[in-house]
Structure formats: C-alpha cells, structure tokens
C-alpha cells in the first residue's frame, strides 16, 4: 500500500527520540529521527514499489524536509510489542493561513502490510493532525488502481473529490490521481482553539 505526496510550510517542535504521538492496541506513532536510518532503509529495500529513500544519503536528504519550522511531519508506525517499524505516514505540504491543510503520504512495509497496522496508525495520525497540529483539512492523492489505499482512506471517512490528470511526478512521469479529503468537523475532532495563523473574521 503506497500513497506519496509533496511538501511546503509549518511549525514543529523538536521531539526526543521515540516520543509517542499516540498509541493504539498494536501500534505506536512517533516522529522519524536520524536514529531510524538503518531500520527504515532495511524496510524500504525489502518492500516493492516504494518511492522512498534507499541510501543513507537519500535518507538524510529526505529527513531534512521534516522537523521544526518545516512544512511536513514524518511519522513512523511502530509495533507496540517489539518497536519494529511497520510503516510510515507523512503529513506533507502543510499550509497555514486560510487553508490549514496538509497532504498525506504513506507506505506499509513488508512483512507488515495487510495486517491492519496502517488503519490503526491512520486513526492516530488524524487525531494528531486535527488536534495537535490544528489542521482543518487533510488530503490524500491516490492512484485509481491502488485499491488497498483507497479502501484505507474510505474506512476513515475521506470523501472523493475528483480526479486530477498529471498531478504527481512519480517514477519519471506525471501521473493522474484521485483526490480524497477529510476535514476536522467531518472527523468530529475540531480543536478547542484554531491555529494562531488562521485569520480572525
């Protein structure tokens, strides 16, 4: 299951290594750090069809997109019992002001795909995005042929908003994707106070 997004403008505070951002029955959600490089690369290399880094240099470049003052949040899905990395979910292209929007990119790693870990993790990500980051809206851009990814998004209440040809540059070509979205009020997790960058009336 793969869904990759883009990246652009936010604020994040540094987190200690392994700081939990949420946990479910089987998984823990936390931010990716440089300590994760070796295991992350091992998981990516063992999983077919991912548009993710496969070398230490590419990993460091990838990681530099995320963190304090950046427009994206790189999150890892880890098993509660072992700490093993089962997948990753990124909140990319965070734009504040009147938009308060982010774009999801995610991947389940072998041998953990198809076991429901990503669904548990996405529930945690939605709460993190809408409550902690105070976003109003999340988007997911998914290839129409990626049925497992579509099923995951639909399971969490995302609505289909249409098809955009030539939307994302993947594997050397511009490819069309379906656009799916979820707002905090659709999800029922509107924060008590809006993000400070949201303009007042």
Image (tube, rainbow, N blue to C red):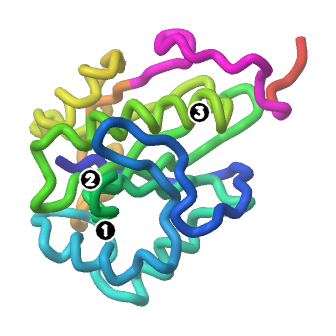
Residue 139 vertical placement versus 48 (above, below):
above
Q: Is residue 182 magenta?
A: yes
Q: From mark 3 to mark 2, how far is it between C-alphas?
A: 20 Å
- Using the image as rendered, state which of residue 23 and residue 62 is in the foreground: 23
In terms of secondary structure, where does tag 3 sit?
strand
Locate residue 158: give its quadrant: top left
Q: In the visual, does 123 lie left or right of 65?
A: left
- Using the image as rendered, state which of residue 72 and residue 12 is in the foreground: 12
Whichever of labels 3 and 1 marks the residue nearer the N terminus, that label is 1
Disc number for residue 52:
1
Disc number for residue 102:
none
Q: Residue at x 23, y 78 (%)?
A: 42
Q: Which residues are magenta?
A: 181-197
Q: Quadrant of the C terminus?
A: top right
- Using the image as rendered, state which of residue 8 and residue 37 is in the foreground: 37
Mark 3, residue position: 101
Q: Residue furthest front?
A: 81
Q: Are marks 3 and 2 in contact (CB under 8 Å)?
A: no
Percent coordinates x, y for residue 93 in the rendering: 55, 47
Q: From mark 3 to mark 1, how far is it between C-alphas?
A: 23 Å
Mark 2, residue position: 107
Percent coordinates x, y for residue 163 in the rendering: 28, 27
Percent coordinates x, y for residue 50 in the rendering: 21, 63
Q: From mark 2 to mark 1, how far is it between C-alphas?
A: 9 Å
Whichever of labels 3 and 2 marks the residue nearer the N terminus, that label is 3
In terms of secondary structure, where does tag 2 sit?
strand
Q: Residue at x 83, y 34 (%)?
A: 197
Q: Are marks 2 and 1 in contact (CB under 8 Å)?
A: yes
Q: For mark 3, does the 10 Å Cα neighbourhood hold few (<14), some (14 to 19), or many (20 or more) residues?
A: many
């Amino acid at each position: 299951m793969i869904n990759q997004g883009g990246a652009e403008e936010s604020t994040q505070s540094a987190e200690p290594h392994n700081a939990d951002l949420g946990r479910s029955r089987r998984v823990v959600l936390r931010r990716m750090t440089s300590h994760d490089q070796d295991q992350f690369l091992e998981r990516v290399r063992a999983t077919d069809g991912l548009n993710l880094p496969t070398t230490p240099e590419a990993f460091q470049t990838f990681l530099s997109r995320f963190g304090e003052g950046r427009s994206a949040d790189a999150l890892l899905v880890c098993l509660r019992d072992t700490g093993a990395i089962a997948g990753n979910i990124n909140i990319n292209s965070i734009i504040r002001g009147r938009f308060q929007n982010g774009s999801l990119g995610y991947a389940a790693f072998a041998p953990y795909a198809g076991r429901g870990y990503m669904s548990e993790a996405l529930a945690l990500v939605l709460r993190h995005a809408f409550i902690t980051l105070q976003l109003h809206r999340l988007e997911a851009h998914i290839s129409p042929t990626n049925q497992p990814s579509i099923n995951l998004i639909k399971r969490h209440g995302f609505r289909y908003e249409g098809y955009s040809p030539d939307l994302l540059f993947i594997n050397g070509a511009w490819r069309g994707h379906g656009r799916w979205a979820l707002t905090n009020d659709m999800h029922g997790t509107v924060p008590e106070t809006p993000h400070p960058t949201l303009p007042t009336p």
